[in-house]
Image: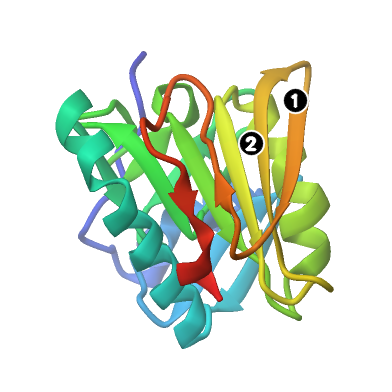
Amino acid sequence: MTAPKRSDQHAPAEEQPTPRTPREFFESLPPTFSLRAEIIDGNLRMSPSGPLQHARTARRLSRALIPVEDKNDWESFSGDVDVFIEGPRDTLVPDYCLAPVNAPLWGDRELLSSALIMVAEIVSTGSMETDRATKPRIYAEGGIPIMLIIDPIASPPTITVLSDPEKGTYRAMSHTQLGKPVRLPSPVDFDLDLDTSTFL
């Protein structure tokens, strides 16, 4: 698959064609660390980076899965990579994702969804609908085998494990209260139960 290139050099405004679609506008944006740019259901959405707790939880998840990464030659990213969702051509920025080393890209910086192993979203008051309903559907459409929804604002706080995607939905789902161990399914096949108490 040949992917379009996102240029690091931006031509003067008079030389750049006016973006006509959310995809074209997204591709014209320079990388930014202060705002998160995503295409969700064909609409460009700009949102501030997640709160400190997002970064802390994502980092703890990453540290817990280091043995899995090392065993399988995988690597993880915490809220700092774009994922190109094949099919709907949306672009999401998961709070955490797990991918093979040297996973294929779409363009210069978007990981292809078909290459990913797992993604996770950490729910906040401003992202409840998106993280709990919209993103699971889009990630399933992109064929990502596992999605975690870490929901510290639910009552009680929970972690949801979604797996076995087919036709835009995850066919397997389990809810566990945060603080209790969780087993991650294939292809992660975590040998030890994931200690979710670190997410509280």
Where 186 sits versus 49, above or below?
above
Q: Quadrant of the C terminus?
A: bottom right
Using residue 16 as the reference point, say whether residue 172 is left or right of it: right
Q: Which mark is residue 132?
A: none
Residue 149 spot, x, y in % from top left: 65, 53
Q: Quadrant of the N terminus?
A: top left
Residue 5 spot, x, y in % from top left: 30, 38
Q: Residue at x 36, y 65 (%)?
A: 60
Residue 3 spot, x, y in % from top left: 35, 26
Secondary structure under tag 2 reads helix
Secondary structure under tag 1 reads strand
Say which of 30 and 176 sits in front: 176
Within-10-Å neighbours for mark 2: few <14, some 14–19, many 20+: many
Within-10-Å neighbours for mark 1: few <14, some 14–19, many 20+: few
Residue 102 spot, x, y in % from top left: 18, 30
Amino acid of disc 2: Tyr
Q: Is residue 88 visible?
A: no
Q: Is residue 74 visible?
A: yes
Which residue in the structure is indicated by mark 2? Answer: 139
Amino acid of disc 1: Ala
Using residue 44 as the reference point, say whether residue 96 is left or right of it: left
Which residue in the structure is indicated by mark 1? Answer: 172
Mark nearer the N terminus (2 vs 1): 2
Where 11 sits versus 54, above or below?
above
Where 129 sits versus 6, above or below?
below
Say which of 129 and 179 sits in front: 179
- Name the outermost residue toward the bottom: 52
Q: Residue at x 59, y 22 (%)?
A: 143
Using residue 110 as the reference point, say whether residue 36 is left or right of it: right
Using residue 107 as the reference point, say whether residue 95 is left or right of it: right
